[in-house]
């Protein structure tokens, strides 16, 4: 036999060991990997844990790809073993090189990318009858998974898509800190206050004095097309999802500045920093990103702030001097919640003294804790639901003062002085609640809830013995806000159904209209003007007519750059907006 014939015979024998790969199963699985990433945004009326499908569905589909490779691919035994080893080695080395912000997402991004690349490489070379197809699959795994080494993550958008940027580009926090280091910030502004004087809060904290997002006595001209808002000032801020508290010419908020959480006071007139007080604390996670979540609360001349990692502190609102601080993790014996401590402190006056009250989510009798405003000592603590990212609210319940909060258990009402339970409306929800209860008078309550549950109107009543009960009036899954609070105006309900704004009838929960894709934005109601100011998730400033007669958008223009979850604040005709990158003030037109 000639040498050419011997080589041809050897090649034929070699190719005879190989069979074309079966590709239908991996094609379907690659499609499933892609589909799972988009299910949370496509499945508007899914269960409350739909986000978990987007987070963990792709990696489960990836495991099925490897099962196919090992058991049903028709590859040779050597291919299967070597191919699996190459995939594991590739993914391990890729994960080791990830940016620290992407490291928690290895299961969500890197592994599905790499395994999808491996599958695509094998699908494309499935007819090759040689070991080369396994090598191509491994190289495709390296190329796809290696993409995740090129990016960093700044959190997730409301539809659970990640806010990815090139790894080598500076972060907004780095740009903000660089400006401060270069001395570009203005000299600290000065307050014109006499000793002992402090103005009454015009916006005491989270969603206003009543925590309902309603602005009363506004004289705003709603014709913004003819008289658009005028930008007064704009400046960079440190990352945080905090909004503003306002007193006189002072704006108070929280920011992350490097390894420190800062309570900050700015001038409402020109945006100059008046004071900043920092403590060592830094919190970040893959979905919410970096920085504090809660809005500071003004109580007289004191400012109380809750940090994302658990520091509760009180500052002198005039000077920023730290009066006291408490580590919630230590006093409540609890760990940091998945998305950080998010409860904006509630400050109340009681016969026993002034208190600040926060939800901790701790086990046992420390789920909600009250602290003395004078020194931060514990005044009382009581059990509560664990899954709440909302804030406590001072309400009237059937003629009696109470503090209320929503959790996975339902709506909980407590006595402010002692924390003793007044009433629990039992409406369990799988997952978290991150919204405020909305009282209609003192005998009706709206409980907004996200996917899987919707929104419910409850009629409250007392029996002859004084026992409180709650009766469901209606429940609608046409309004499923996530962390975007709702508004009521003239017997109609307004809010976010997922990412789309809508209106329901308060009487029966029937849909008035649905329209306007504003993402997971926030809104406030200008009751006298009959309009709603929406700050969209992408930073657009929107003016809507608060009417049941259809979606009527009166104005829309870009206001902030990037992801925006912070609540807007309106004082007079001054509109204060911020996100995790910048703050801006607009002067709104005044009605004749």
Image (cartoon, rainbow, N blue to C red):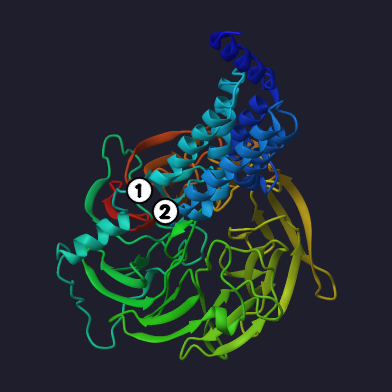
Mark 2 nearby-residue class (10 Å; few <14, some 14–19, many ≥20): some
Q: Nearer the viewer, residue 395 or 123?
A: 123
Horizontal side, residue 465 vs residue 102: left or right: right
Find residue 368 and report its image quarter: bottom right
Horizontal side, residue 107 vs residue 455: left or right: left
Q: Nearer the viewer, residue 193 or 581?
A: 581
* Contact check, label 2 and label 1, Cβ < 8 Å: yes
Question: Residue 422, percent across and down?
Answer: 73, 75
Residue 229: mark: none
Residue 373 versus residue 540 in the image, above or below: below
Horizontal side, residue 591 vs residue 59: left or right: left
Residue ID at (45%, 44%): 148
Residue ID at (64%, 46%): 56
Find residue 393 and report its image quarter: bottom right
Residue ID at (48%, 38%): 142
Question: Residue 331, percent across and down?
Answer: 58, 84
Mark earlier in primary sequence (2, 1): 2
Q: Nearer the viewer, residue 496 or 242?
A: 242
Residue 99: mark: 2
Look at the image and tell me in which quarter the N terminus lies.
Answer: top right
Residue 501: in sight, yes or no?
A: no
Question: Residue 506, percent across and down?
Answer: 65, 46
Q: How many marks?
A: 2
Residue 183: in sight, yes or no?
A: yes
Residue ID at (23%, 69%): 273
Q: Nearer the viewer, residue 385 or 52?
A: 52
Q: Disc 1 marks which residue?
A: 167
At mark 2, the secondary structure is: loop
Mark 1 nearby-residue class (10 Å; few <14, some 14–19, many ≥20): some
């Amino acid at each position: 036999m000639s040498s050419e014939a011997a080589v041809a015979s050897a090649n034929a024998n070699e190719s005879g060991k190989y069979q074309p790969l079966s590709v239908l199963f991996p094609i379907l699985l690659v499609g499933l990997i892609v589909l799972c990433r988009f299910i949370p945004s496509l499945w508007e009326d899914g269960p409350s844990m739909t986000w978990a499908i987007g987070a963990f569905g792709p990696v489960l589909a990836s495991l099925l790809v490897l099962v196919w490779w090992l058991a049903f691919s028709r590859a040779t035994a050597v291919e299967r073993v070597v191919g699996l080893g190459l995939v594991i080695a590739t993914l391990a080395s890729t994960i080791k090189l990830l940016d620290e912000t992407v490291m928690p997402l290895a299961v969500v991004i890197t592994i599905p990318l790499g395994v999808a690349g491996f599958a695509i490489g094998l699908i494309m070379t499935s007819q090759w009858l040689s070991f080369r197809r396994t090598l191509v699959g491994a190289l495709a795994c390296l190329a796809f998974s290696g993409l995740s080494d090129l990016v960093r993550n700044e959190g997730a958008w409301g539809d659970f898509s990640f806010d990815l940027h090139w790894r080598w580009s500076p972060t907004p926090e780095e740009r903000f800190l660089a400006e401060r280091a270069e001395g570009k910030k203005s000299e600290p502004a000065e307050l014109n206050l006499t000793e002992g004087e402090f103005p009454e809060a015009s916006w005491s904290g989270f969603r206003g004095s009543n925590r309902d997002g309603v602005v009363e006595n506004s004289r705003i001209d709603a014709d913004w097309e003819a008289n658009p808002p005028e930008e007064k000032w704009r400046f960079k801020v440190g990352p945080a999802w905090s909004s503003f508290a306002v007193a006189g010419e002072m704006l108070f908020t929280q920011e992350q500045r490097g390894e420190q959480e800062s309570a900050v006071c700015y001038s409402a007139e020109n945006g100059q920093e008046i004071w900043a007080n920092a403590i060592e604390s830094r919190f970040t996670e893959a979905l919410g990103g970096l920085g504090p979540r809660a809005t500071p609360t003004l109580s007289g001349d004191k400012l109380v702030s809750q940090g994302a990692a658990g520091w509760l502190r009180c500052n002198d609102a005039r000077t920023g001097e730290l009066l006291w601080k408490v580590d919630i993790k230590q006093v409540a014996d609890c760990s940091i919640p998945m998305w950080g401590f998010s409860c904006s402190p509630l400050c109340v006056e009681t016969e026993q003294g002034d208190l600040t009250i926060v939800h901790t989510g701790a086990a046992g009798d420390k789920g909600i804790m009250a602290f003395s405003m004078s020194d931060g000592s514990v005044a009382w603590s009581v059990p509560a639901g664990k899954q709440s990212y909302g804030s406590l609210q001072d309400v009237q319940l059937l003629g009696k003062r109470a503090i209320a909060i929503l959790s996975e258990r339902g709506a909980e009402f407590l006595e402010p002085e002692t924390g003793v339970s007044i009433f629990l409306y039992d409406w369990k929800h799988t997952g978290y609640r991150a919204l405020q209860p909305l009282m209609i008078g003192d005998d009706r309550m709206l409980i907004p809830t996200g996917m899987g549950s919707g929104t419910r109107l409850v009629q409250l009543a007392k029996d002859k013995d004084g026992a409180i009960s709650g009766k469901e009036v209606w429940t609608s899954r046409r309004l499923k806000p996530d962390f975007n609070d709702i508004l009521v105006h003239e017997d109609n309900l307004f809010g976010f159904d997922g990412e789309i704004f809508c209106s329901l009838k308060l009487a029966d929960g029937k849909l008035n209209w649905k329209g306007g894709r504003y993402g997971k934005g926030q809104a406030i109601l200008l009751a006298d003007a009959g309009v709603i100011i929406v700050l969209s998730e992408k930073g657009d400033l929107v003016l809507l007519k608060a009417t049941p007669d259809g979606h009527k958008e009166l104005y829309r223009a870009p206001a902030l750059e990037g992801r925006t979850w912070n609540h807007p604040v309106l004082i007079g005709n001054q509109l204060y907006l911020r996100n995790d990158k910048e703050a801006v003030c607009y002067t709104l037109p005044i009605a004749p």
